[in-house]
Image: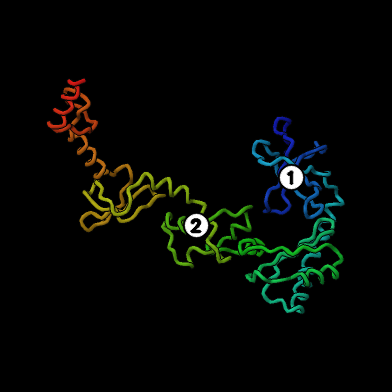
């Protein structure tokens, strides 16, 4: 689908992997490029081939200073070379694991080998819990073996799960391997707000970290709970006065204990007894700011001694 002139901006969003992060580049002199097409760009890791995802509004880009422009549109030869080098990645990974085993490197797991589209750069993704692990010797050996520039990239457990793929505890393909392009911060509070069991089996994913799906409905739960009474609160219901035993945000209801019987009551049937009592007490306190009565602002009337002192002060003035 081609973009209109009005939709075009001098900045494009480029992605180097199917579910990778979006990087910003200037269009430069390549003005005929369209979303979905591929472009060759110069990066810190050498020349790479990326897919144009969309044109980006310059207002959404915080740092434009030093932004690089794309070199050119990818041609058929670039696409073929990319596929050729991709077929060699598995053999490169196997070779890397063999070299690591000979060097007695046991604290690292090598997950993926990735060639640049022209074969000038080879990256090995690995994970380890040993922060003092030195793999410079392995990098040197790999450089002599493949006769190309070698990069050893340390990745975290979530990235490992994303690369490995597979199925999550829900039985569906892992979110990180299907549609997540970036990992959001996740806290234990998100599980508490949604009433999820805090046992490790319930809240941790295959990567051993908190499940990414905990963030999906968190905001909806928070907003829904603002409209419902908290657990332990006394409320009025069509079944009588009762105490809230459970909150069900997505159903917009609460479970109420009324004289030993449990009833699910929806929000439109609830009566906030404590709030109503507070308003009644406030109204019954009287008002000193308005004459003639009939006011419900709840301001307390001053006692006779305070009123007399006030009147004496007014006279002296």
Label ID, residue 187: 2
In the picture of the structure, the residue carrying the numbered disc 1 is 52
- Looking at the picture, tell me which residue is in the foreground, 303 or 15: 303
Q: Is residue 70 above or below residue 86?
A: above
For image coordinates 59% across by 57% down, the residue present is 175
Q: Viewed as shown, does residue 248 lie left or right of 67?
A: left
Position of residue 203 measured from the top left corner of the image (x, y, whole percent): 49, 63
* Residue count near mark 2 (Cα–Cα under 10 Å), binned few <14, some 14–19, many ≥20: few
Determine the CA span between mark 2 and mark 1.
33 Å
Position of residue 253 measured from the top left corner of the image (x, y, whole percent): 35, 49
- Quarter of the image for the C terminus: give it: top left
Position of residue 172 measured from the top left corner of the image (x, y, whole percent): 57, 60
**Colour scheme in use:** rainbow
Q: Is residue 45 above or below residue 139?
A: above
Position of residue 59 measured from the top left corner of the image (x, y, whole percent): 65, 36
Q: Viewed as shown, does residue 195 lie left or right of 62?
A: left
For image coordinates 59% across by 64% down, the residue present is 167
- Looking at the picture, tell me which residue is in the foreground, 260 or 14: 14
- Looking at the picture, tell me which residue is in the foreground, 131 or 264: 131
Q: Is mark 1 on a helix, strand or loop?
A: strand
For image coordinates 74% across by 70% down, the residue present is 135
- Looking at the picture, tell me which residue is in the foreground, 176 or 12: 12
Q: In this view, does 108 lie above or below 159?
A: below
| Res. 165 visible in picture | no
Q: What element carries label 2?
A: loop
Label ID, residue 197: none
- Quarter of the image for the N terminus: give it: top right
Closer to the eye: label 2 or 1: 2
């Amino acid at each position: 689908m081609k973009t209109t002139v009005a939709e075009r901006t001098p900045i494009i969003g480029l992605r180097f992997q199917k579910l990778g992060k979006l990087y910003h580049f200037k269009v430069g002199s390549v003005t005929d490029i369209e979303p979905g097409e591929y472009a060759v760009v110069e990066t810190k890791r050498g020349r790479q081939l990326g897919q144009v995802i969309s044109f980006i509004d310059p207002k959404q880009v915080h740092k434009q200073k030093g932004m690089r422009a794309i070199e050119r549109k990818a041609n058929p030869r670039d696409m073929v070379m990319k596929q050729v080098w991709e077929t060699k990645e598995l053999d490169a990974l196997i070779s890397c694991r063999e070299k690591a085993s000979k060097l007695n490197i046991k604290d690292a797991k090598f997950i993926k080998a990735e060639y640049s589209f022209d074969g000038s750069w080879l990256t090995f993704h690995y994970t380890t819990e040993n922060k003092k692990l030195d793999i410079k010797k392995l990098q040197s050996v790999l450089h002599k073996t493949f006769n190309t520039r070698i990069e050893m990239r340390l990745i975290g457990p979530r990235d490992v799960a994303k690369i490995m793929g597979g199925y999550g505890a829900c039985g569906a393909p892992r979110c990180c391997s299907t549609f997540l392009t970036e990992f959001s911060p996740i806290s234990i509070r998100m599980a508490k707000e949604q009433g999820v069991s805090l046992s490790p089996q319930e809240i941790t994913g295959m990567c051993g970290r908190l499940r990414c799906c905990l963030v999906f409905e968190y905001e909806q739960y928070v907003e829904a709970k603002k409209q419902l009474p908290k657990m332990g609160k006394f409320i009025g219901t069509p079944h009588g006065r009762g105490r809230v035993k459970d909150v069900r945000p997505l159903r917009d209801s609460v479970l109420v204990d009324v004289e030993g019987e449990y009833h699910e009551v929806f929000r439109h049937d609830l009566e906030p007894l404590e709030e109503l009592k507070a308003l009644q007490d406030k109204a019954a306190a009287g008002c000193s700011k308005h004459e003639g009565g009939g006011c419900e602002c709840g301001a307390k009337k001053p006692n006779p001694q305070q009123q007399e002192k006030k009147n004496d002060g007014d006279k002296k003035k």
